[in-house]
């Protein structure tokens, strides 16, 4: 019987020992010299690619829509030109610091004076259409090169068609 009492007592002591509770955790503030330093802010990432408003960014965004073409002795804006000029206007309205020059060109036929005047009319037609789309007139200038800066050298209809144009280029401040 003594053995039973001893066995029960021992098992009770072991059972109570297994139920031991841990004391509650108390947050103790760290000493001031152990506080982690405040992280320094990370600088914003450097933008990749050309600067918005630059000629390189413009060319990349336009993908050929920076140039419109004209028929022989004409300076009217057709529906295809309107699409390109709308893209130009959207860009210029998005980047309000961007300034542009519209260059007017002609093919080699005609006198120098006639081609300069025709190039001017082409540049002004493109500029006026951009202004009608909301681009401030003060951000646009025009210049005529007449036949002096051909895109394609040649004396055939294919070359002449590529040279009868107005090209919008960004102006660096």
Image: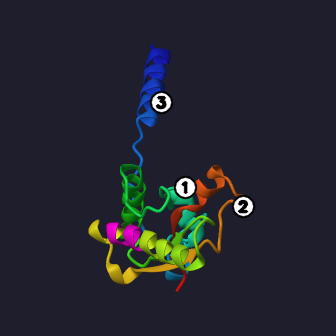
Can you name the residue that lies furthest to the bottom here?
173
Residue at 57 percent across and 59 percent down: it is 60
In the depicted view, which residue is nearer to us: 83 or 55? 83
The residue closer to the viewer here, 50 or 13, is 50
First along the sequence among labels 3 and 2: 3
Rendered position, 10 above or below 124:
above
Q: Is residue 67 visible?
A: yes
> Which element is circle 1 on?
loop
Alpha carbon distance from label 1 to label 3: 88 Å
Please report the residue visible at 42 percent of the width from the left and 73 percent of the height from the top: 121
User: CB under 8 Å between callouts 1 and 2?
Assistant: no
Q: Residue furthest top?
A: 1
The residue tagged 3 is 14
In what quadrant of the picture does the N terminus appear? top left
Label 3 crowding class (10 Å Cα cut-off): few <14, some 14-19, many 20+? few
Marks 1 and 2, how far apart at CA: 19 Å
Tell me how far mark 3 sits from mark 2, CA to CA.
Answer: 104 Å
Prevailing SS of the magenta stretch: helix
Residue 102 in magenta? no
Q: Which mark is residue 153?
A: 2
Instruction: Give the residue at mark 1.
Output: 64
Q: Residue furthest right?
A: 153
What span is in magenta?
Answer: 124-129
| Residue at left offset 48%, top offset 77% | 117
Q: Position of residue 54 (x, y in %)?
A: 55, 73
Q: Is residue 121 above or below residue 4?
A: below
- Give the percent coordinates (x, y) of residue 86: 36, 58
Q: Which mark is residue 104?
A: none
Of the image marks 1 and 3, the number of the one nearer the N terminus: 3
């Amino acid at each position: 019987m003594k053995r039973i009492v001893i066995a029960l007592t021992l098992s009770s002591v072991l059972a109570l020992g297994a139920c031991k509770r841990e004391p509650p955790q108390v947050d103790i503030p760290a000493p001031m010299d152990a506080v982690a330093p405040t992280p320094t802010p990370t600088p914003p990432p450097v933008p990749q690619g050309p600067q918005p408003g630059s000629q390189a960014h413009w060319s990349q965004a336009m993908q050929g829509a920076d140039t419109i073409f004209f028929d022989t002795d004409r300076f009217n804006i057709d529906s295809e030109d309107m699409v390109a000029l709308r893209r130009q206007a959207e860009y210029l309205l998005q980047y309000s610091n961007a300034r542009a020059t519209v260059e007017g060109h002609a093919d080699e036929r005609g006198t120098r004076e006639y081609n300069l005047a025709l190039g001017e009319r082409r540049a002004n037609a493109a500029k006026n259409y951009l202004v009608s789309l909301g681009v401030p007139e003060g951000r646009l200038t025009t210049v005529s090169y007449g036949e002096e800066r051909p895109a394609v050298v040649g004396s055939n209809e294919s070359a002449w068609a590529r040279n009868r144009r107005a090209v919008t280029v960004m102006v660096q401040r």
